[in-house]
Image: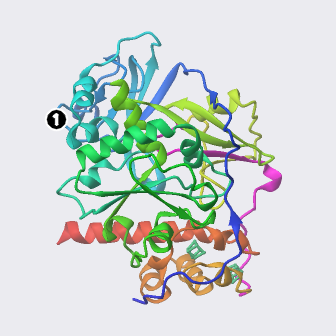
Amino acid sequence: MIKRSFFGLATPLFPYDPPPRPPADPLDIPLPETISLYIEKPFESVSAVKLKVGERVHAGQFVQLMPGDAEGTVSPVAGRVTAVEPYSGDFGRRYTRLTIAAEPSGPQDDAFAAVAAEPTLAGLTRYLSDCPGAPPLHLLDEGGPEIDTIVISGMDSDLLMATSQYVMESRVEDVKKGIAVLKQVAAEKHIVGVVPRDRIQGYGHMGCEFLAADASHPAGMPVKIMHDVFGRTVPAGQRVEDVGAAFFPAEAVAAIGRSVSEARVEMHKLITVIDKQGVTRMVSAVIGTPFSAILAACGITLGARDSLIVGGPMTGAAVYSTDHPVQADTDALMVQDSADVPLSSDYPCINCGECIRICPVHVPVNMLIRFLEAGQYETAAEEYDLHCCIECGLCSFVCPSHIPIFQYIRLGKYELERIKALEAEND
Ligand code: SF4
Ligand code: SF4
């Protein structure tokens, strides 16, 4: 496999979008009548699920399909289960989807209060892994990868998104409390915060060191932060965890801090909403809220051919239903007018070289795309650096033939992972 030297090409700068100072309050999205949650366990059959339609859950309750399951999620609301059904996510990943009819004044589960009184890593992992920012607490467990550094990222990983930067401006006390909790449950880890260079002042009292990163895409992506700020290169095909870092979005740390200090699981997610004109606003919605409720509250109408994208313009993924719910890692929701949607076309690669010039890791994108289009994923990985790609989305953005390069890359990586897992199963 080719292992190219990482990073170094001076790519055109796409500056991130900082929130205004002082940041405006987020728009609170009213609690919807029903919320939907995903459990990372495939739905096999009704008889394989103990959680039944009609069952009542409390707000903050850890909900499992079967007693004793490791997989589960915390219900942000009290209410009644109205559906338990299979759900296929990206690339056919299988989950179970729960729908809960919310009862706004229903009871609160009190089990988390004991965890908050004496936080342990296991307790926090059970209750807070699906809270805003999706804190990767499981990575700190002894059985996981060898993590020596917890990175608190105040960087957003796409353009127009400002969720992490907003948290570092408006939820500083919660982040500080979260840092104190992390120090308590992961005392041996080094904790470091990272914020955009032009916002580095004012974090001297947080309880850990804060470092500066460039404020332009793709500098906010974890692999790039590892390289630029920490001088650690993530080898092709590996993750930041493999070089000893656990990335916690600033919102995740704030949610940990607020949950423990208030003895109640924080389940309000901040989301940057980007409208058809590219105007952004911050909203706060309970996890599980359908996107339709957010669009309605923001006065955004979705036309027949408009696109709804989860994430930012470079790395976001289109969703095809406004029923899709806010999840712990939904940082941005973007609506693209049909007139602005770049139609992916059947145009072939014209070998203009734009993708190669802009790629921050020197992937030979023009060659890579040929093999990905042909479904030759092994060759794409072995000879054309598929695994070197950091998924910044810049190549798709500049391609004059509108080839959905980024989507092909994600599919190629997924297919290789799936083949590897199947081979391991058959061994
Ligand atoms: S998404 Fe495209 S530009 Fe970005 S690293 Fe991957 S191949 Fe290079
Ligand atoms: S930018 Fe598009 S058309 Fe140009 S070389 Fe790359 S894949 Fe081909």
Quarter of the view holding residue 285: top right
- Residue pictured at 26% horizontal, 53% vertical: 140
- The secondary structure that most of the magenta stretch takes on is loop
Q: Which residue is painted at 39% across and 38% down in the image?
A: 177
Query: Is residue 251 rendered to the left or right of residue 353?
Result: left
Q: Is mark 1 within 8 Å of ligand 1?
A: no
Residue 41 in view = no
Residue type pointed to by label 1:
Gly
- The residue positioned farthest toward the top in the image shown: 105
- Indicate the secondary structure of the residue bearing disc 1: loop
In the rendered image, residue 60, in percent from the top left (x then y), is placed at 35, 24
Q: Quadrant of ligand 2?
A: bottom right
Q: Residue 322: x and y, percent?
A: 61, 37
- Position of residue 104 measured from the top left corner of the image (x, y, whole percent): 47, 13
Which residue is rendered at x = 36% and y = 28% of the image? 261
Is residue 294 visible in the rendered image? The answer is yes
Number of callouts in the render?
1
Q: Is residue 96 magenta?
A: no
Quadrant location of the N terminus in the rendered image = bottom left
- Please report the bounds of the magenta region as a residue range: 324-351
Left or right of 336 in this view: 144: left
